[in-house]
Image (cartoon, rainbow, N blue to C red):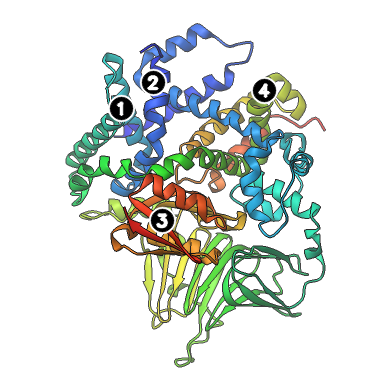
């Protein structure tokens, strides 16, 4: 147990996020709630792990997910007919997908590169320079002739979009007008020097 | 639950901001530690985003020269070409070396929507190197691919057609319209905008009409699947009888309402409907139109439409899933919770060596992953490792049995 809680969380919990979120989408279905539920599940996991790390993290993750779904189902008075029985077979189900796990390294890389290309132009440049070329924010601002605050804004949005892609969410990172506006807004705050 | 939502949103924005600020002179380690200690929610958000951000560094291998890593997608795209040597890869990986260094990005119409973009652009560079540019010449009328083939065909109007395995189509560019008929197989269309010349794809009695948009059409006998990735496609079902309703004049009332709703909203709306015990899963059938009720269906981006002889089924999917369905354009098959029977059917489209499932017990096993469509063996091998399945070679067939 020499590793930090962050390392443990990254190694034992996060790799199951794609399966977890897919499951939530299938079962819980309220699209807009899935990320919040995922976050709540993680909070419960971490709270528990700070006291004592579970010996079987994956099983623990899905049992927390199960309990949280049941709580919410009760709370919202939604009768999800197949919720309970499916949850019981869940662990079996995720143990069966080993080819998927083997392919996941390359799959993740491809998802990342696909996401990367869909980022708005300026955001992609900023993320690339920061993450791949390790340039400091100041240097990025100088090269692109934009304000440092703008660089940071693009980074913040880019980091979140990369996470969604990395964990394999069925979500469009460049979804429509909202994103385009954000990009425009970020750029509009300073004048281009050229 | 509103408070929780706000707190996740806040925690993630703040975590991303901390990560972004990490290298700057005004980085305040004490403040960061304080923020982190403040709540579990903060820690969750930070751990998660930080892990992804660090992993994103792996994209470096697409930038530098690492033939071993990009070999798979490249190889699959130019499946019909001779073996590719490492020096070639080294040269052409320069093409994707530094997107950031190209502030005015070159238009890359084909690559732009392709799923595995960086890798795919390497492959396109290779195609050029290997003399594949002969495709850029004025194309003849009829194009076809063999089993396992993949061919991009630029048309004289600036549009581009990508033919999948075992496909055949005919193109005629008229002054008033551009007409393609898909006789067999599957094709992806990137249509150059030209309002005065609609781009029409005929498949049997159905036609897909586009002005400037991107979509794929797949034909299996009488069954047609249309996937729209950009813009809107108008699907017209011409019927032998009842021709009084002109197929030229679509009325918006006939358009299934749900096809105009983004998948996310649709799923949210349907599941939150009062008294709905059974929520509609995302990606589930959104509308079922029999020919009696609709001659014309508008398919917005994100639509997956399946037309049988006498019915059209439309559903909406997130763009990421749509891209996966179209990963064949990079020579890849993407499975996600796919029954083995379906995965096998897909592989069999691309290969002369056929996989045969001999035991119904294994047909419904679910699997996921990304595979090269023309390379059966790694798939079979993984199958044997991950599932109770045994493979036996028999001539040009691979027999799968329960182990």
The mark closer to the camera, 4 or 2, is 2
Q: Residues within 10 Å of mark 2 (few under 14, many from 20)?
A: some
The reply, left or right, for residue B225 in relation to residue A44 is right
Upstream in the sequence, badge 4 or badge 2? 2
Question: Marks 3/1: CA distance?
Answer: 34 Å
Residue with the mark numbered 1: A57
Q: Residues within 10 Å of mark 1 (few under 14, many from 20)?
A: some
Residue with the mark numbered 2: A8
Q: Are marks 1 and 4 on the same chain?
A: yes
Residue with the mark numbered 3: B391
The mark closer to the camera, 3 or 1, is 3
Extreme residue toward the top, this view: B30
Q: For residue A150, say whether it is visible.
A: no
Name which quarter of the figure residue A5 lies in.
Answer: top left
Name which quarter of the figure residue B62 lies in.
Answer: top right
Please tell me whether mark 3 sits on a helix, a strand or a loop: strand
Taking the spot 27% from the left edge, 20% from the top edge, the residue there is A48
Q: Residues within 10 Å of mark 3 (few under 14, many from 20)?
A: some
Question: Marks 1/2: CA distance?
Answer: 9 Å
Above or below for A155 versus A167:
above
The mark closer to the camera, 4 or 3, is 3
Please tell me whether mark 2 sits on a helix, a strand or a loop: helix
């Amino acid at each position: 147990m020499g590793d930090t809680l962050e390392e443990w969380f990254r190694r034992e919990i996060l790799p199951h996020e794609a399966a977890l979120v897919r499951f939530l989408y299938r079962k819980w279905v309220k699209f807009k709630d899935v990320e919040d539920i995922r976050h709540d599940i993680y909070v419960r996991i971490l709270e528990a792990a700070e006291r004592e790390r579970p010996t079987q993290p994956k099983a623990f993750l899905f049992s927390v997910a199960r309990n949280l779904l049941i709580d919410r189902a009760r709370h919202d008075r939604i009768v999800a007919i197949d919720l309970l029985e499916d949850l019981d077979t869940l662990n079996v189900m995720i143990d069966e997908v080993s080819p998927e796990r083997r392919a996941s390294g390359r799959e993740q890389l491809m998802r990342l590169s696909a996401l990367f290309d869909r980022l708005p132009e300026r955001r992609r440049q900023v993320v690339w320079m920061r993450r791949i070329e390790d340039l400091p924010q100041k240097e990025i601002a100088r090269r692109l002739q934009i304000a440092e605050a703008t660089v940071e804004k693009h980074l913040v949005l880019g980091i979140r979009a990369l996470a969604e892609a990395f964990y394999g969410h069925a979500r469009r990172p460049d979804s429509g007008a909202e994103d385009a506006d954000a990009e425009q807004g970020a750029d509009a705050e300073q004048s281009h020097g050229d | 639950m509103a408070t929780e939502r706000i707190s996740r949103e806040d925690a993630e924005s703040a975590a991303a901001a901390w990560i972004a600020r990490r290298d700057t002179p005004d980085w305040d380690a004490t403040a960061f530690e304080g923020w982190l200690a403040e709540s579990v929610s903060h820690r969750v958000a930070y751990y998660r985003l930080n892990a992804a951000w660090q992993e994103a560094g792996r994209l470096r291998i697409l930038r530098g020269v690492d033939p071993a890593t990009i070999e798979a997608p490249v190889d699959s795209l130019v499946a019909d070409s001779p073996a590719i040597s490492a020096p070639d890869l080294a040269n052409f990986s320069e093409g994707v070396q530094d997107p950031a260094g190209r502030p005015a990005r070159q238009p890359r119409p084909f690559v732009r929507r392709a799923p595995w973009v960086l890798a795919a652009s390497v492959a396109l560079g290779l195609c050029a190197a290997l003399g594949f540019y002969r495709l850029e010449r004025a194309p003849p009328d009829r194009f076809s691919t063999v089993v396992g083939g993949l061919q991009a065909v630029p048309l004289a109007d600036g549009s581009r057609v990508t033919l999948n395995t075992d496909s055949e189509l005919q193109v005629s560019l008229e002054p008033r319209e551009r007409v393609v008929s898909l006789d067999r197989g599957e094709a992806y269309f990137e249509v150059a905008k030209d309002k005065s010349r609609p781009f029409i794809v005929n498949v049997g009695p159905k036609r897909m009409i586009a002005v400037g948009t991107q979509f794929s059409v797949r034909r299996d006998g009488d069954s047609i699947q249309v996937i729209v990735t950009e813009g809107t496609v108008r699907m017209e079902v011409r019927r032998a009888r009842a021709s009084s309703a002109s197929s030229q004049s679509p009325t918006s009332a006939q358009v299934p309402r749900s096809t105009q709703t983004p998948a996310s909203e649709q799923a949210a709306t349907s599941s939150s409907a009062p008294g709905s015990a059974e929520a509609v899963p995302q990606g589930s059938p959104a509308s079922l139109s029999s020919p009696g009720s609709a001659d014309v269906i508008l398919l917005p981006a994100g639509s997956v439409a399946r037309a049988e002889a006498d019915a059209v089924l439309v559903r909406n999917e997130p763009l990421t899933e749509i891209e996966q369905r179209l990963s064949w354009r990079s020579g890849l098959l993407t499975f996600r919770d796919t029954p083995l029977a379906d995965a096998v059917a897909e592989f069999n489209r691309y290969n002369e060596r056929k996989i045969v499932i001999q035991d119904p017990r294994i047909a419904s096993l679910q699997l996921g992953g990304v595979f090269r469509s023309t390379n059966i063996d790694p798939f079979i091998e993984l199958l044997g490792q991950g599932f109770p399945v045994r493979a036996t070679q028999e001539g040009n067939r691979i027999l799968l049995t329960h182990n």
